[in-house]
Amino acid sequence: MELRVLQYFLAVAREQTISGAAESLHLTQPTLSRQLKDLEDELGKQLFIRGHKKIGLTEDGMLFRKRTEEIINLVNKTENEIKNSDETNLVGDIYIGTGETDSIRIIAKTAKQLSEKYPNIHYHISSDDAQDVKENLDKGLIDFGILLRSSRY
């Protein structure tokens, strides 16, 4: 399975048409259709529900989309880390996952202050539930996870 084909899959899932995805990818429609068919054959699963005007995802397709997005994000993160590894200044991206709480304001304020001091560091803060934060930490998709547990007296 090639990274380029994963990007094709995501384009079709996003555009919901082969022709729209082919146009955005600068490919011919038959070429893109063949790549997607080969992907489904390789996986042994149907990923798309093909309609007259739009294409949807099967349950397997929805799972594959989620995992493909994770793969692409991890590849992009890795490329950025490698490209910037020899910089003398602090450079890079910090990915933070947190629950939806008021503490997100403190995190955002702190990130803004640090950005002023270190302008080449970029912060990506996502709001998820506890399970997703833990899962993203385990997969290396985020660098920090902030979870709060309420206490009862």
Image (tube, grey):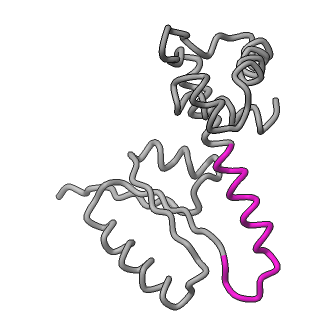
Question: Left or right: 150 with respect to 52?
Answer: left
Placement of the N terminus among the 4 image quadrants: top right
Question: Left or right: 32 with respect to 102?
Answer: right
Total labels drawn: 0
Residue 5 lies in quadrant: top right
Question: Left or right: 88 with respect to 94?
Answer: right
Residue occupying the point 68% across, 11% down:
45
Residue 99 lies in quadrant: bottom left
Most foreground residue, 6 or 105: 6
Instruction: Residue 13: give x, y in percent of width and height.
Output: 55, 28
Instruction: Tell me where the magenta segment starts and ends, as one range.
Output: 72-91
Question: Left or right: 62 with respect to 90?
Answer: left
Residue occupying the point 71% across, 33% down:
6
Placement of the C terminus among the 4 image quadrants: bottom left
Q: In this view, does 61 lie above or below 86?
A: above
Instruction: Residue 50: give x, y in percent of width and height.
Output: 55, 10
Residue 94 lies in quadrant: bottom right
Predominant SS along the magenta part: helix
Most foreground residue, 98 or 75: 75
In the picture as drawn, the residue positioned furthest to the bottom comes out as 117
Does residue 26 show up magenta in the picture? no
Q: In this view, does 106 lie above or below 2?
A: below
Instruction: Residue 92: give x, y in percent of width and height.
Output: 65, 73
Residue occupying the point 65% across, 52% down:
140
Most foreground residue, 72 or 97: 72
